[in-house]
Amino acid sequence: MKKTWPNILICRHFGQPVAQTHPHLINDGEVTPGLTKSEFLSRRIKLVEKAIRTFKGVQTVKDHILIIPGASKVFMTNDIPYPFRQNTDFLYLCGFQEPDSVLVLKSGNETSERNHTSCLFVPEKDPEKELWDGLRSGTSGALELTGVDLTYDIRLFEEFLNNYCKFNSGFVLWYNFLRPVQQKIHDSVTQEMMVESKYKCMEDPTRLCQQLRVIKSPAEIELMKQSVETASQAFIDVMKFSSPEVNESALYAKMDYECRMREAEFLAYPPVVAGGQRANIIHYINNNQRIKGGELVLMDAGCEHHGYTSDITRTWPVSGKFSPAQEKLYNGILSVQLACINLCTIQFSLDQVYHAMLTFIGQQLQLLGLVETNLHTSKLMQKAKEFCPHHVSHYLGMDVHDTGEISRSINLQPGMIVTVEPGIYVNESDISVPEEFRGIGIRIEDDVLITETKPIVLSSSCPKTVEAIESVMTSSS
Ligand SMILES: [Mn+2]
């Protein structure tokens, strides 16, 4: 009988999924699922080029060094870590998923692409540590995995900075000093570079990085579509699972389960699962109350799929059938939401969509008899703000509230992905409105891709009209 031996020699060990170990997740040439080494390389080049451009014409500036730390593990109690989540900018620039690392980008003397260098400092392999905490890629694994130019043991980081300062002057240090990501790295930067002000000037690279991140590449758009589709399908399962007296926590658990079963890593944020008047607490996350038969439930949830998030809100009757008052208010806010989506084009900014939303909500409030019809415009806007105290949108991407440094007053651009999420929240003790509407809170939120022409709703498979929701809830499969 012929004996076959396991091919142990070619089986390298890495601290994160690679094509050899996780062929179901990742293809050859990819650093993280769906994203290639060349895409990461082009992100790094673009960032350094942006840094150089910022100082173009300033003769005294010679070089640029950018320091982007990865995250460290955070512990909830002795030895018990929270689920690890990599620092977003670091992940965006190199795809390395282990804690306690740092990326350093150095500009070359010329602005030619080839001259920029990327160095990744990582925890070196250590059999004893790996026995407890899992595999590490180490310096050689990280080099092969990410395609950066150089990798070093993280323990050499301080020495590296020390040497850099010895042999360089007149450089710009790009480091977010105000929001340290990793204490050790922060101490090293402070110690080696701040003490004698070795740099010519210090700048925060966060905004430059977010200017890149806010426009999604084709590969990123594909990942976003998958993330949003996963959450949309999970919403359908949660709607079907709803029934009178269901606990909010059960709907939360069902959402989490259905997203993970579709290979999302986890929910992107603690979801809002708010029955009845609890929907009027915008960030309600206690999720521990039973929902009565006649009530609506508002669920705001999304997942993280290979580092990209979805963020959807639906509001539906747990019994499967809207009451006449619920339906009226629901259709009112739905018409606002559809009108806002139509404005998501390169002609407008998110702030302009927000102001339009206030106008649309004002009109609906008057049509539904929630406010008087003879109000002055400014008073009507004020009323609209009272019924919807939040913005209509935020950018969406690797983070849920993505690229927070990018103003919402700039025009939308192709490749941006944004949420559209108007709501109406009627206080139960507001005696100025018809009784039938009191205590109802409704929000409808979709994820929308901006193109050269029309907006594309990525969450369109998630039921949204009264008919679609009622029909999904009565169908058996
Ligand atoms: Mn949102």
Image (cartoon, rainbow, N blue to C red):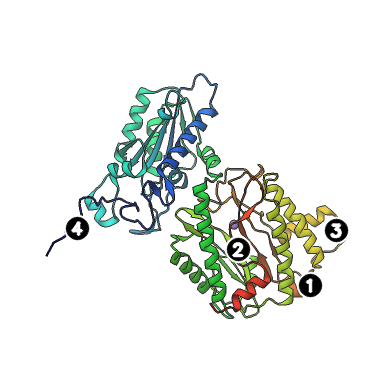
Q: Nearer the viewer, mark 4 or mark 2?
A: 4
Q: Is residue 271 left or right of residue 87?
A: right
Q: Nearer the viewer, mark 3 or mark 4?
A: 4
| Residue that label 3 marks | 375
Q: Is residue 411 left or right of residue 51?
A: right
Secondary structure beneath dot 2 equals strand
Q: Identify the image quadrant of the N terminus.
A: bottom left
Which residue is painted at 47% across and 32% down in the image?
Answer: 48
Q: Assess whether mark 1 and mark 2 are in contact (beta carbons under 8 angstroms).
A: no
Tag on residue 6? 4
Mark 2 within 8 Å of ligand 1, using the beta carbon: yes
Residue 228: image quadrant is: bottom right
Task: State the residue in front, 375 or 43.
Answer: 43
Disc 4 crowd, CA 10 A, few/some/many (<14, 14-19, 20+):
few
Measure the alpha-carbon separation of dots 2 and 1. 25 Å
Residue 161: image quadrant is: top left
Amino acid at circle 4 = Pro
Measure the alpha-carbon separation of dots 3 and 1. 17 Å
Amino acid at circle 2 = Thr
Instruction: Return the disc, 4 or 2, that comes first in the chain's sequence.
Output: 4
Pinpoint residue 257: horizontal percent, then vertical percent. Answer: 46, 69
Measure the alpha-carbon separation of dots 4 and 2. 49 Å
Measure the alpha-carbon separation of dots 2 and 3. 31 Å
Observer able to see residue 257: yes
Measure the alpha-carbon separation of dots 3 and 4. 79 Å
Disc 1 crowd, CA 10 A, few/some/many (<14, 14-19, 20+):
few
Instruction: Return the disc, 1 or 4, that comes first in the chain's sequence.
Output: 4
| Residue that label 1 marks | 434
